[in-house]
Structure formats: structure tokens, C-alpha cells
Image (cartoon, rainbow, N blue to C red):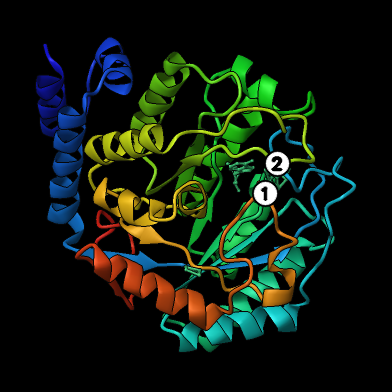
């Protein structure tokens, strides 16, 4: 089989032998690359047309109890400026997002136990009370099943928790001993069973990542069947143990986005901020490789530069309205349009 045939089969069947996936990830020529992106765009178009969904991201706390080796918010980073938004500030952000046409609000933070389950539930239910037509996505890390259930009962619709890597040895090289791949995966299955639309995902080019790992991740995602997949390049942060590591490349990220689109045709796939950070037109290129979601920043300007997962993060100086406008133009420039809608998973039958 050659690469064109591999892409054709992947598009037709949504799956490929591990060995062929590995070859696809490592040996694409420029021409084959374009063929892959075209296939991904076609599949994406069949499921979502040329619509791109907007998610308004509110980064409400930079405190984190974890010490992931790759992340600028890790608790061991003494240079990270910590902040917490109060409930009314979060609600105000959400309000502003609603006015700007966002119908999904993503509440993201480090793992910050200052926000009790009651507090999270109250924030979620207040947003839902004010705007029943908004979807609330949580991205606040590993919790007990009971906590996940409580947030869901309070009205949360979706949950993002990248699995980071399905390989336990690789997981252990990226995280301190007290964290485990098994608990991460337990969380993902709990979330799914409770009824959330769930997002998993990985960084591209994270330290120690091999092609075999990425193939394992693709097969895991195929089996797990997430509604959303977050994929962005690893970018080193100067105050972490991985400061001197190479970043993930634009090409590898775009290849993986396109392959993910072919394996999970109706998945909600963001062109991430990290992708926009390693290339000035990274997010547009992500859309052209099969992505269909963008997540402009809604956090209050004064806290933005404190939520530094990695060096050079873009959109730290802009107001919400500016990011919204900028994003709209960027998406239009590549022939797609942002839409004001909840943008649920196309398999859910809700839209
Ligand atoms: N580079 C790229 N992505 C990162 N994340 C954390 N640190 C980095 C980094 N240095 C990603 C992780 C996490 C998400 C919130 O941000 O995948 O799940
Ligand atoms: Fe905390 Fe998430 Fe960063 Fe890990 S990746 S240190 S859990 S904010
Ligand atoms: Fe934030 Fe362009 S999307 S400034």
C-alpha cells in the first residue's frame, strides 16, 4: 500500500493498521500531505459544512495542585503569578461572551481546590439560569465521579480532559509519581458514563513521545469515541523542567489533526491556541487540515498573561471583543464562517 491508498482507506473505513498509521505519520510527501488535508476537509464538510464553532474560554484560576512537568502552571513554578476570579467576575465574563455571540463557555483552570464542588456547581447553574441556550464546558482536571456527577446535575454539558498520552510509561515521564494514566482514563470513562460530551487529546511532540505512542493514542481515541479531541503542539515553558526541549512542529500537528478527522469524522476538533502560537496562521491552517472549532480567549485582560501554560502564548493582550473579531476574520480568510450556535456534536442529534 502507498500513502495515497492509506489515506483512501482511512477515509473509507475510519481505521488503519497500526503499522500503516505509523508510516502515514512519518513519511508524507508534500503532495500526499495536501491529499490528506483535502480528504479531511471533505469529511469535515460532510458533517459540519463550512461552519466553525466558537468557544469562549474563561481561564478562571492559575492555581494548580499538580506538578505536570510540561506546564507553566505547575505548583513547583514559583515564578507563575497566581490569580483567582470570583464568581461575579466569571459571570460577567460569560455575560460579555454571550453578548459577543458565544453559545459555549469553557471554564478552565488549574486543579484548584479553593473552588469547592458547591462553588463550581453554583457558577455553572448561574450561567445556565441566565442563558439556557448556552452550553457550559468544564476543563478543571481530575475529580471524583461524585464531583463530576454534581457538576453535570448543576447543568454542565461538556468536559475537556486531555489524556496527554495513553502509554503508561510515557505518562510517567510527563507527570510526577502521584499522577497516573489509570486515574486519568478512569476520569474519562466516568465523564462519558455520566452523560457529558467528552474531550480527550494529546500534545504533539511532547518530550519522549514516539510515533508508536501517537499510534497508540489514535487507537485509544478510536476506541473511546470522544465527542471532542484537543490536539496542539507541545511548547516549552522557561520555568519548567522541559524548558530546553524542542516544541512540536506545525507539520506534525496538522497531520495529526487531519488523521483524527478521518478516524473520527464527526468529532469536534479545535484549531488550538498553541497551534496559533507556533505559526502566525496556525489556526487557519488547522481549519484547512480538518479542524472545526476555535476557542478565543474571554478571560479579563489583566489576568491573561498569568495563565501561561507555555511560552509565547498569543492573545494575552487583547480584549474579548478583539479576539472575537480577529477570529472571525481569520476564519473567513480561508473560506469558512464562524457561527453563533452551541455547536453540539453532530452525532448527538440535538441540532
Ligand atoms: N505546551 C502545550 N500544551 C500544554 N498544555 C499544558 N502545558 C503545555 C505546553 N507546555 C496543555 C495540556 C493540558 C492543556 C490544558 O494544555 O495538554 O491538558
Ligand atoms: Fe495543572 Fe493542568 Fe498544568 Fe497539569 S497541565 S500543571 S493539571 S494546569
Ligand atoms: Fe485573539 Fe486574534 S484571536 S487576537
- Circle nearer the N terminus (1, 2): 2
Few, some or many residues within 10 Å of mark 2 (<14, 14–19, 20+): many
Label 1, label 2: how far apart the Cα atoms are = 7 Å
Q: If the image is split into quadrants, where does the C terminus sit?
A: bottom left
At 58% from the left and 79% from the top, the residue drawn is 319
Ligand 1 position by quadrant: top right
The residue carrying mark 2 has its beta carbon less than 8 Å from ligand 1: yes
Snapshot quadrant of residue 118:
bottom right
Q: Residue furthest right?
A: 78
- Determine which of the numbered discs, if any, sits on residue 309 in the image: 1
At 22% from the left and 66% from the top, the residue drawn is 336
At 15% from the left and 30% from the top, the residue drawn is 31
Judging depth in this view, the residue of 131 and 207 nearest the camera is 207
Q: Are marks 1 and 2 in contact (CB under 8 Å)?
A: yes
Q: Position of residue 171 (x, y in %)?
A: 63, 23
Q: Is residue 21 above or below residue 141?
A: above
Snapshot quadrant of residue 49:
bottom left
The residue carrying mark 1 has its beta carbon less than 8 Å from ligand 1: yes
Q: Position of residue 69 (x, y in %)?
A: 73, 32
Q: Is residue 171 visible?
A: yes
Q: How many marks?
A: 2
| 163 left or right, relative to 37 | right
Instruction: For mark 2, give the secondary structure.
Output: loop
Q: If the image is split into quadrants, where does the N terminus sit?
A: top left
- Determine which of the numbered discs, if any, sits on residue 115 in the image: none
Instruction: For mark 1, give the secondary structure.
Output: loop
- Determine which of the numbered discs, if any, sits on residue 237 in the image: 2
Amino acid at each position: 500500500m502507498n500513502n495515497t491508498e492509506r489515506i483512501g482507506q482511512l477515509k473509507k473505513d475510519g481505521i488503519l493498521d497500526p503499522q500503516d498509521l505509523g508510516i502515514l505519520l512519518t513519511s508524507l510527501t508534500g503532495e500526499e500531505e495536501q491529499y490528506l488535508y483535502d480528504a479531511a476537509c471533505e469529511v469535515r464538510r460532510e458533517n459540519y459544512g463550512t461552519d466553525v464553532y466558537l468557544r469562549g474560554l474563561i481561564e478562571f484560576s492559575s492555581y494548580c495542585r499538580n506538578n505536570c512537568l510540561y506546564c507553566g502552571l505547575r505548583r513547583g513554578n514559583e515564578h507563575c503569578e497566581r490569580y483567582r476570579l470570583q464568581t461575579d467576575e466569571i459571570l460577567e465574563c460569560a455575560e460579555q461572551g454571550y453578548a459577543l455571540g458565544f453559545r459555549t463557555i469553557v471554564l478552565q483552570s488549574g486543579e484548584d481546590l479553593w473552588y469547592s464542588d458547591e462553588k463550581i456547581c453554583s457558577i455553572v447553574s448561574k450561567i445556565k439560569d441566565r442563558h439556557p441556550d448556552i452550553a457550559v464546558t468544564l476543563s478543571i482536571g481530575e475529580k471524583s465521579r461524585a464531583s463530576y456527577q454534581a457538576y453535570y446535575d448543576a447543568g454542565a454539558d461538556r468536559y475537556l480532559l486531555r489524556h496527554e498520552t495513553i502509554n503508561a510509561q510515557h505518562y510517567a515521564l510527563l507527570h510526577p509519581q502521584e499522577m497516573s494514566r489509570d486515574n486519568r482514563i478512569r476520569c474519562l470513562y466516568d465523564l462519558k458514563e455520566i452523560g457529558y460530551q467528552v474531550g480527550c487529546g494529546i500534545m504533539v511532540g511532547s518530550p519522549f513521545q514516539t510515533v508508536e505512542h501517537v499510534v497508540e493514542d489514535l487507537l485509544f481515541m478510536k476506541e473511546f469515541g470522544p465527542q471532542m479531541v484537543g490536539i496542539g503542539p507541545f511548547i516549552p515553558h522557561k520555568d519548567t523542567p522541559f524548558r530546553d526541549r524542542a516544541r512540536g512542529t506545525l507539520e506534525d500537528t496538522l497531520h495529526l489533526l487531519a488523521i483524527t478527522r478521518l478516524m473520527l469524522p464527526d468529532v469536534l476538533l479545535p484549531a488550538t491556541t498553541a497551534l496559533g502560537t507556533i505559526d502566525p496562521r496556525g489556526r487557519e491552517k488547522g481549519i484547512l487540515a480538518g479542524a472545526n472549532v476555535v476557542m478565543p480567549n474571554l478571560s479579563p485582560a489583566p489576568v491573561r498573561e498569568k495563565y501561561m501554560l507555555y511560552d509565547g502564548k498569543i492573545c494575552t493582550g487583547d480584549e474579548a471583543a478583539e479576539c472575537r473579531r480577529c477570529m472571525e476574520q481569520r476564519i473567513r480568510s480561508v473560506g469558512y464562517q464562524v457561527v453563533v450556535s452551541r455547536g453540539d456534536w453532530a452525532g448527538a442529534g440535538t441540532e
